[in-house]
Amino acid sequence: MPNTLSPSALRTINDYLSLPFRGAGNVRCPYFNNARRGRRGQLSVLVGKGSPRDIAEEAQIISLQYHKQLFDHEGCCLHHRQSGAPPGGGGEQHGAGEEVARDIRKFLIDNGLGVDCSGFVTRVLAQHFLETKNVNLLKRLRVVSPARFWRWLVAKLRPMENISVSTYASDENTEKVKLENARAGDVIVMLRTGQRRDRNHILIITETDGGFIRYGCARAWGCEGKYGHGVSEGFIRLVNPKAGLLGQEWVELGKTGEANETFLEAKQAKTLEIRRLKF
Amino acid sequence: MFSPDLIQTALLYLIFSALGAFIWAPLLTKFLYKYKITRRAEFDFTMKGDRGCKAGTPIMGGLLVIATVTIITLIWNWNRESTYVPIGAMAVSALLGAADDLLNIFGKPRRERTLKQTLTLIRVHKFWRTRVWYVLSLPWAFYKRAVSAFGSHPGRGIQVHEKLLFQFVAGAIPAWWIYYKLGEHWHSIWTPVLGQIPIGWWIIPLVIFAVMFTANAVNIADGLDGLAGGAMIITFLGLMVMSWTAGRESFTLLNGTVAGALIAYTYFNVKPARFQMGDVGALGLGALVAINGIAINRTLLIPLLGFIFYVEIVSVILQVCFRRLLGRRLFKMAPVHHHFEFKGWSEEKIVMRFWLMHAFMVILAVWISMN
């Protein structure tokens, strides 16, 4: 019997994989990390922490504000009318529909709209815990110690923007879980990864089914270039459960081994753990 | 009880002012075009798409009202006890607005040094005297940073922190006048139910705040063709009636004069606008609304008299608070008239509805003041 996330959490992931734009489907949410831009005190959607709906609305606002002619006042995509693609999107549309999705994704990336890994995981987990345990994740996660009053106050006001991978790696919020005990709703935390060991990354386990662990994440692979990155799904085939996470086969976008950059990141990470929220 | 002669005279001032403004409006338009005091698309990202037609429209059209009112008042309604200070404060605010308008067009782009840069310079500057200067001026740098977090960054013209200081002066003049020159009975404010409540020297910050807030509110509301002008006509007509019922002769005439000039201005300002008010008109007339409200001792009714202006400025304050504190938007865009534009309302629909709401609130204010 597969163990999966709650329906609303799965719906959130689907919304990230196909952002809720009216008249345009299959617009995968891009990856955005605020580290380089360093926007402070900004809208959560502009620092990589927005929900799919926030991102779609902000795209509409920016399009109208700067007269990009991408969406109308109702939030409906204007390109599908011009290109003749059917409204509503869906997997069946090709050609013009894909072109529209590509245009919108380019627009999102050029305007710094997207989600980072911890933002994505938090949005999904928040839905999961709300539905399964009636717990408000944003209120329960301990982000900053009250001893650092100012930071603590800011984190209370804007928890979403202050939750990072470190929050999930903290023993105050989560506990380590063995590979064989992993289940949907757990997270895979990678600390100090990348070539320079200066980044953290997080994946959320969406389904476990005996020999598989399926996960979702927001990431930017180098091989995907400027406009190819975004929210993605992959799975870990448990070929040798006793060998730890790195001993398994990681598959994402049909790539395995070090060609799968998520696996490469896991391999480079100083700390690689599966963790489960304590509440 | 109310002098019919006074209101008759006020209406005459109104008619005369409107006619005078109508006569010289073409000259003003020609002047503004000649010296290219117009909205430039290259400085304004909003001048694209359906708003592209606004590019090239003269600004500083508010001069029509400011100059007409000042001249008529100087010639026929000059009174050191009443009109002296309102006109003075209006002129100071209008001068500030005019400087901002002109610098926005002809000024060089301005780049403000950030607080972080100042702190770095304190550590690394090679001259110790300059380092000391930066340390001494640190409070000013803090003030600039704090204000800029809540204001817009036009890149040209007068910056928010400078504007606030000038407006403070424009508010301090009537505050000084009311507290020191108008006598003891002005040290209290009128309330609808409780009557007069003594507040002593608190009248000074109250006046300064009212002037600064209202001037900025009108400035913010001046974003759609005809909106600020039409709403101002209603406000000054309300003020005219209120000063008439209060028996304040000079103010009745002054408010009538302003309403008349505004009729001419709005005639040319409705969509598609022949000219726009600019900061010169918005700041000047905004200050005048507050001062005239205070001068007839109806300070608490100013939010109703300037209802739509207050709605606009409060929408901006709320939007900034939501954005900075909670990280989300309250409106799609602020001020609130842009929110409705984003919802797909036409400019005319927004303006008409805002006028009607404003008119209702001004009538309510007049009714309350008569009770």
Image (cartoon, coloured by chain):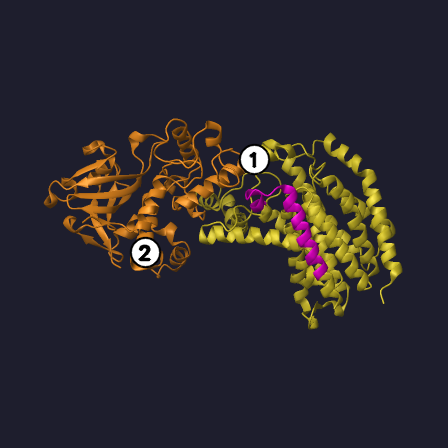
Q: What residue is at 16 percent from the left and 48 percent from the top? A: A179
Q: Find the distance from the CA under tag 2 to the CA under tag 1.
A: 44 Å
Magenta span: predominant SS is helix
Query: What range of the chain is rendered magenta?
Result: B338-364
Describe the element under mark 2 as helix, strand or loop: helix
Q: Which residue is mark 1?
A: B45
Task: Estimate how packed mark 2 is, as few (under 14), some (14 to 19) or many (20 or more) residues with alpha carbons within 10 Å.
Answer: some
In the orientation shown, which residue stands out farthest toward the bottom? B194
Judged by depth in the image, the label closer to the viewer, 2 or 1, is: 2
Q: Amino acid at mark 1?
A: Phe
Describe the element under mark 1 as helix, strand or loop: loop
Q: Amino acid at mark 2?
A: Glu
What colour has chain A?
orange
Q: Which residue is mark 2?
A: A131
- Taking depth in this image into account, of B57 and A70 the one nearest to the observer is A70
* Quarter of the figure that contains the C terminus of chain A: bottom left
Q: What residue is at 66 percent from the left and 46 percent from the top? A: B351
Judged left or right of residue B31, residue B154 is left
Q: Which label sits on residue B330?
A: none
Task: Check residue B359 for magenta coloring.
Answer: yes
Label 1 chain ID: B
Task: Estimate how packed mark 1 is, as few (under 14), some (14 to 19) or many (20 or more) residues with alpha carbons within 10 Å.
Answer: few
**Quarter of the view holding residue A219:** top left
Judged left or right of residue B55, residue A115 is left
- Taking depth in this image into account, of B83 and B132 the one nearest to the observer is B83
Which chain is depicted yellow?
B
Q: What residue is at 74 percent from the left and 48 percent from the top? A: B91
The answer to whether residue B93 shows anywhere in this view is no
